[in-house]
Image (cartoon, grey):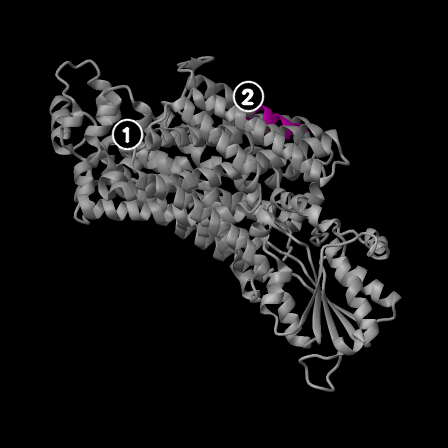
Amino acid sequence: MTSVITLLIVVALIAVSLGVAVYTRRSARTSSEFYVAGQNISWLQNALALTGDYLSAASFLGVAGAIAIFGIDKTWDGLGYFGGYIVLLMLLAVPLRKVGKYTTSEVLTSRFKGSKSLRFGGMLGAVVISTFYVVPQIVGAGALLQLLLGWNYTFSVLVIGALVIAYVTTGGMRATTYNQIIQGLVLWGAMFVIMILMLSTMFGFNIGDVLTQADNMVPPKLASALLANDPSVPDFTTLTPDEAIAFVSGKLTGQDTALTPGTFAPNWMNTMALAMGLVFGTAGLPHVLTRYYTVRKPKDARTSTIGVLLMIGSFYIMTLFVGLGAMYVLYPDLMGYFMSGNSSIAQNMAVPLLAERTGGDIMLGVAIGGAFCAILSTVAGLLITIGTTVSHDFYKEVINKKASDRREVLVAKLAIVAMGIMAVGISLGMADQNVSYLVTLAFGMAASIIFPVLFMSIWWKRYTRQGALATMVAGLIVSVVFVVATLGGIDSVLGLPVLVNPALYSLPAAIITGAAVSLATKDVGDVENFMRKVHGKTE
Amino acid sequence: MLGNILNRSNGKAGEENIILLATDGSKPALTATKRAVELAKVTGATLHIVCVKEDLMRMPLEMKGEEVAEMELMGIHAKGGEVAMEWAARNSVPAVMKTYEAGPVVGAILDYARQIKPSYIVLGHAGRSGWEKIALGSVAEGVMKHSPYPVVMTRGYNDAYIADLLEIALTKIGLPEEVVEEVSMVPLEELHIGRKLGVAFGTLLVFLIPYFGLGALTSWATDIATTKVLGDANVMVIWVLLLFPIGWITAIVFHRMASKKEAEA
């Protein structure tokens, strides 16, 4: 249970960021100045909105949190999240903007006109991926409430689930873009302040010292597992960081340190599966792809993406040092949480705990408030994507073609409530998982279900309607099977070892199946007009 | 009598008598339209009609959510400028229409007002209150507050008063405009899809090779990965930190190449 000051700062930070977003939307209508120049910075606005959309609990809490317990092996998360935008930039960004459609289903049916199965497949893929992406946000928010108010996890998740669903279906559905712009800035700023405070109070502004300490530590996740049954283990909470590190290092001489690879992904198959899932996952995330619809000109799709790369790249570099620094500062705490079975806090709360240790109640408030901003903006983006695809691709196109805007918005809200409830239900069983790890699984599914079908539709003239469907089905089945297997602790499926990410199997399966079926069939859709639109000169 | 009163303005004597009407095609705006045309007829003024599109960065569902919430106040989303032009023509009032493709709405109305120096501005007040007013503000109040010209404001609407305009408005409902981009009918071969993919993928490899190379290094050459090269920073740390600038440079170079190609084409 934290202090009133912390609670006030959390509430104030969320209220101010939402307030600024509403004010910005309002002044876009009522400002008395007429500024044509505003049009020229649309790429920057879009870059910030994408950043706010993208930097979720996984990035704000999970990446640094995972580095704090696993060490440098977990920089793969940040690297992959970053690299994903480079794949998106080079292979899909401009073509997607040129198609001018805002859901995967619509892009696919621009080429394969009238295909209800592709439309439904696109919707299903978007719903599965987005729901899986919402879950870690709720898990992170639940753990935050646990830390902030001392509630138990289940109650925290139920409360946060209800609040988030209410927020998105009422005010959050409107002015979302502005919320994301503001919250992108808040998140980056909060991580920067936490890093500077940590470096100044604990490491005398010497980044080299962070690495020196990291090289002396056995990552807490590894150490706690190895010392689980050791009767000589002391009560870590009574030790200083140096004492705790010295004890563990003395017991586990020769073990991997925080700067040794392999503590999370222990062999090449796991490492490559993770790397592949992440780098091809971004280009299949429905809420990211949808955002390109708001880019004004095709060329701005590139500049917006470069803006995002600069924002998130610098953010993930910060998380590397914050994560390693947190491991040192919080070493006794993290060991204590793991040894006492409180792994849900150890998994995800390193950033807020570090902020508290270096900046007291005020910084704890900034960290938790920042994390809530991350969660709100991302969940809003995700649930709105689900609402859009269900109401537009399914209800409006399949069930009721004459649906009014009012009815469409109502169906979207119902879909959001249904998916929100489902995500809350799944979250209740995921308390002990690192949120960034859960997000990497959503990336693996996106890399298999959406990315290959879009990539081949846009770049391959010989791709067919049946091939597209086969790509999606293969990607969906293989990725979901392996995600369920990895979460269920199953070691192998059909003789294949279950890895930390499904993409090593599901991405090639989707591409090979799609290519084989395409070569055996002939219906290439409206390829001429589609290709002219996507690759022709439109500016 | 009304004509005499409204003929007076801040403008200098001898200047053209102009009434500026701001309309968004909603029922409150149709009310203002009717009033403005009446006044123009009485005073012999020319009616200038200004319409401002809100070209905001938002997703379709955001836009629809906003429109649905607004519908109760607006009543109808007609093409306000066209309705006003037709109503002015029916009443033999000379009229000019100006459309701004993007807001801020208040700023655009005042910008046009400064150009034409009207005797006064006529607009409708939708009567937003509570959350709607906080969320979107009020254009009418914004114009009232900042306008250097007199403002005539109608408040709310009455269907009976605007029945004749509603009839016109129903034939000019503002459907969402489909952006139609012209697609040239070049043969597919001239699009050089294969070459474009080659360039895109080739550039992408500049990032992907060191990216997956890091995976290979940490999987098969752990000794090299953990060799210290700069203080306590080992090869893996340096490699990770270099991948970010490699990504940035690759992205910027790709953008410059693509922009150059587009300019040449």
Frontmost residue, B155 versus A487: B155
Q: Chain of mark 2?
A: A
Q: Earlier in the sequence, mark 2 or mark 1?
A: 1
Q: Quadrant of the N terminus of chain B?
A: bottom right
Frontmost residue, A301 versus B178: B178
Name the residue located 22 percent from the left edge and 46 percent from the top edge. A199
Residue B50 position by quadrant: bottom right
Report x, y in % for residue B88: 83, 67
User: The residue tagged with tag 1: helix, strand or loop?
Assistant: helix
Disc 2/disc 1 C-alpha distance (Å): 30 Å
Pointer 1: residues within 10 angstroms few (<14), some, or many (20+)?
A: many
* Same chain for the residues under marks 2 and 1 in the image: yes
Left or right of residue A426, residue A337 in this image: left
Left or right of residue B173, residue A128 in this image: left
What residue is shown with label 1?
A70
Report x, y in % for residue A63: 35, 36
What residue is shown with label 2?
A477
Pointer 2: residues within 10 angstroms few (<14), some, or many (20+)?
A: some
Magenta span: A466-475
